[in-house]
Image (cartoon, helix red, strand yellow):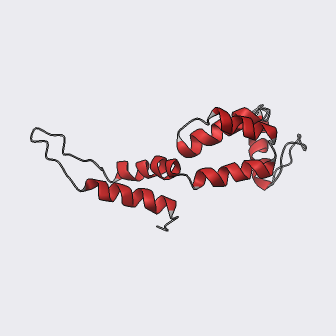
Amino acid sequence: MRAVKNQAWPRGDLDRHVIAAQEARGLSPSPDAAPADLLRRLYFDLTGLPPGEREVEEFLKDPSAANYEAAVDRLLESPAFGERWGRHWLDVARYAESSGKEANMAFPHAWRYRDYVVAAFHGDKPF
């Protein structure tokens, strides 16, 4: 592990690796995000949707690490999480409800596969 000048920033081995690479390039880490920004990033990363005003207000009352972890758990259990991340698998499988070509044949039961993929994310189904 390379020695780093900024000993206050790293919280673990991965952080030390990152900051060592930054320092080698003459860069420094950005300051921590404001609690409202952190929550907004979390919502967009996990669900693709912004948090509501009520969620932001509740989080700002207690922006502790425990409350952040609770927000992560709540979002991982939300339907929006499975829908957002299942979409990537559906893209790889070339999911569509119709062929979209000149004949444009409909696949009336395609929704079953879509719902299966979303449910697999909710159920934390292994590969």
Residue ID at (50%, 60%): 122
Q: Position of residue 40 (x, y in %)?
A: 65, 36
Residue ID at (83%, 47%): 10
Q: How many marks?
A: 0
**Does 51 sit left or right of 32 as displayed?**
left
Residue ID at (9%, 41%): 103
Q: Which of 107 and 25 lies nearest the eye of the viewer? A: 107
Q: Residue furthest bottom?
A: 126
The part of the image, by quadrant, that contains residue 27 is: top right
Quadrant the N terminus occupies: bottom right
Vertical arrangement, residue 43 with respect to residue 73, above or below: above
Q: Position of residue 4 (x, y in %)?
A: 86, 44
Residue ID at (18%, 45%): 99
Q: Residue furthest left?
A: 103
Q: Position of residue 113 (x, y in %)?
A: 32, 58
**Does 107 sit left or right of 45 as displayed?**
left
**Does 12 sit left or right of 37 as displayed?**
right
Q: Position of residue 87 (x, y in %)?
A: 41, 48
Q: Which of 5 and 70 lies nearest the eye of the viewer? A: 70
**Does 13 sit left or right of 94 as displayed?**
right
The part of the image, by quadrant, that contains residue 53 is: top right
